């Protein structure tokens, strides 16, 4: 009874000093565990980061992100171990951490989905920096791939930022992933013109351009029978980097070559037959 009265008479600094003396060994042990645990966590995190960076499957951004996850997980283990030195029950600590994690997860649900999608993009690599893609009806060159967003530069110079969750949930068309691409040109000729001659002219046109690959070989064919013309098709393969310039060049050269060969590219036309001897014109 007298001891309780004496303790109650102590000031706050005196009470703290008394508690410090009584728990000195526990404090020193907890401090040692904290320093040693944080040191080991840092070493493991750096080792994981170096190992992931050496792998071709992991981008630098995702490698550092995963290494940080390992580091923070080890920090939590160290913190729980330190608190147990002072008699705090592990179950209560884990319950509190679970509640905090759940609250954070609900508050950042959209952000975390972007992070998860960003990790999948960096790991699966459906596109890389500098490649032209189409995603979510937007076409542009990839400028940056982050954990939250993907940045594109459209061909007209406009900047576009797309959340990673939206990118990952859409079909992605990559125009630069394969080394060669096929270009198809359809040119309409009159029904009275020679289809064989038109095919020969297109094949000769393709063979004269050095950018057209010999394998697969160029192919000319009758593509369609339209209302006013016969569609003659040309399919050629080229290096992906030459695709745009080659498409422009072949389209222009086809018109000039057909004009020189006497093959007409007819305008849309329609024949109108009048029944009876009189026609009525309505204004």
Image (tube, grey):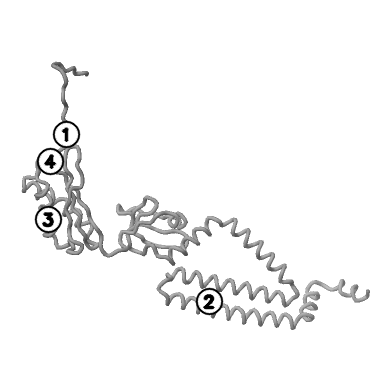
Q: Earlier in the sequence, mark 4 or mark 3?
A: 4
Q: Which mark is residue 269?
A: 1
Q: Picture coordinates of residue 77 (x, y %)?
A: 63, 74
Q: Residues within 10 Å of mark 3 (few under 14, many from 20)?
A: some
Find numbered disc 3 in the image and state the secondary structure of the residue it sits on.
helix
Is 75 in front, or is 14?
75
**Quadrant in which the N terminus is drawn:** bottom right
Residue under numbered circle 3? 205
| CA gap, disc 4 and disc 1 | 11 Å
Q: Picture coordinates of residue 201 (x, y %)?
A: 10, 52
Q: Residues within 10 Å of mark 2 (few under 14, many from 20)?
A: many
Is 112 in front, or is 273?
273
User: Which quarter of the picture shows residue 95?
Assistant: bottom right
Report whether 265 appears left or right of 28: left
The residue drawn where x is 10% and y is 53% is 200
| CA gap, disc 3 and disc 2 | 60 Å
Residue under numbered circle 4? 190
The residue drawn where x is 47% and y is 56% is 165
């Amino acid at each position: 009874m007298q001891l309780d009265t004496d303790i109650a008479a102590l000031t706050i600094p005196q009470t703290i000093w008394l508690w410090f003396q009584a728990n000195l060994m526990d404090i020193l042990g907890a401090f040692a565990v904290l320093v040693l645990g944080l040191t080991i966590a840092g070493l493991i995190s750096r080792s994981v980061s170096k190992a992931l960076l050496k792998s071709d499957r992991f981008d630098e951004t995702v490698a550092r992100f995963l290494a940080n996850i390992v580091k923070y997980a080890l920090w939590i283990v160290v913190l729980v171990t330190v608190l147990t030195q002072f008699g705090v029950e592990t179950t209560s600590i884990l319950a509190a951490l679970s509640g905090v994690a759940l609250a954070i997860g609900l508050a950042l649900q959209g952000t975390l989905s972007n992070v998860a999608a960003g990790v999948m993009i960096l790991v699966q690599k459906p596109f890389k920096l500098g490649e032209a893609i189409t995603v979510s009806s937007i076409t542009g060159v990839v400028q940056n791939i982050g954990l939250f967003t993907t940045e594109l530069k459209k061909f007209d110079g406009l900047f576009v930022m797309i959340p990673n969750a939206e990118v990952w949930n859409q079909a992605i068309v990559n125009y630069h992933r394969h080394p060669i691409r096929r270009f198809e040109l359809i040119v309409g000729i009159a029904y009275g013109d020679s289809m064989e001659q038109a095919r020969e002219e297109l094949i000769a046109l393709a063979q004269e351009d050095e950018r057209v690959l010999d394998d697969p070989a160029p192919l000319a064919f009758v593509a369609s029978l339209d209302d006013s013309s016969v569609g003659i098709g040309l399919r050629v393969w080229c290096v992906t980097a030459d695709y745009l310039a080659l498409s422009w060049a072949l389209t222009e050269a086809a018109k000039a070559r057909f004009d020189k060969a006497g093959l007409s590219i007819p305008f849309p036309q329609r024949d109108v037959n009048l029944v009876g001897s009189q026609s009525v014109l309505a204004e």
